[in-house]
Amino acid sequence: MANRFLTLFRMASFFVAACAAMPPAPAQTVSADEASIRMARQALNTAIEKRDIERYAAYWTANPEVIWASANGLVAGRDANIARTAKAFQNPGFLYGVRTPVIVQVNQEDGAGAAETGTWRWAYHRGGKDIEYQGRYLVGWRKVDGSWKVQSELYVQTGCKPSCS
C-alpha cells in the first residue's frame, strides 16, 4: 500500500507541475460528454454547499479511490469515502468547498473515460479564524450505464489563506 501511495504521489506531483506549466487551451466546441461532466461537477458543488452526502455519493462509481490533500492520504471504497466526506460535512466548522474545472478531456478512443483538472478551495473555521485551503485536482471519470461517475480523485494542496502555520 505504501509503495502504491508513493507511486501515485509521484505521478500526481508530476501531473500538477505539468498542469501549472500548460498554456490555456484554445477555445473549442464542447462535446456532449464534456458538457455532462461539467454539469455533474456543478451538481457535486451544489451537494457540497448543501452538505448532501447522498447526492454527492451518487456521482461515484462502486469503488472510488480518493487521495485527499490532508494527511489522511488514500481512501479506497465507496463506504470509506462516504464516511470521510460525511465527517467533513458534519463538522460545524466546515464553511464551504468548491471545485472549479479548467480542462475536461474525454478519451477519444472509446469515450468511456475522461480526465477533469482544475482548482479547489475548501474552508473551515478553526482557532477563531476562517482558513481556506487551496490547490489543484485531477478527477478520473468513467461512463457507467450512460452516466459519468467519479472513479478516482487526487487533491494536492498548493496554498492556504491566511497562512496555515
Image (cartoon, rainbow, N blue to C red):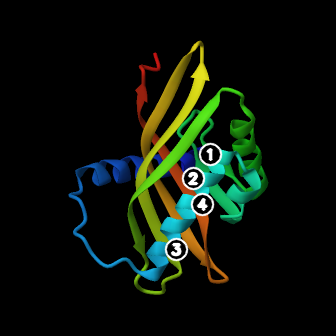
Q: For mark 3, give the secondary structure.
A: helix
Q: Secondary structure at mark 2?
A: helix
**Which badge, 3 or 2, comes first in the chain's sequence?**
3
What's the CA distance linking mark 1 and mark 4?
10 Å
Dividing the picture into quarters, in which one does residue 117 lie?
A: bottom left
Q: Position of residue 24 (x, y in %)?
A: 23, 59
Tag 4: amino acid: Ala
**In the picture shown, does residue 81 fall above or below 152?**
above
Callout 4 secondary element: helix
Give the residue drawn at x 50%, y 51%: 8
Q: State which tag comes first along the sequence, 4 or 3.
A: 3
Answer yes or no: do the residues labelled 1 and 2 have beta carbons within 8 Å? yes
Q: Which mark is first along the chain, 1 or 3?
A: 3
Residue type of the residue flagged with mark 1: Glu
Q: CA distance from mark 3 to mark 2?
A: 14 Å
10 Å crowding of disc 1: few (<14), some (14-19), many (20+): some
Which residue was labeled with disc 4?
Answer: 43
- Looking at this view, is 134 or 74 the one in front? 134
Residue found 60% across the figure and 60% down from its top? 43
Pointer 2 residue: 45
For badge 3, the amino acid type reads Ser
Disc 4 crowd rating (10 Å Cα; few below 14, some 14-19, many 20+) is some
Of all residues, the one furthest to the bottom in this rendering is 110
Q: Quadrant of residue 94?
A: top right
The residue indicated by pointer 3 is 36
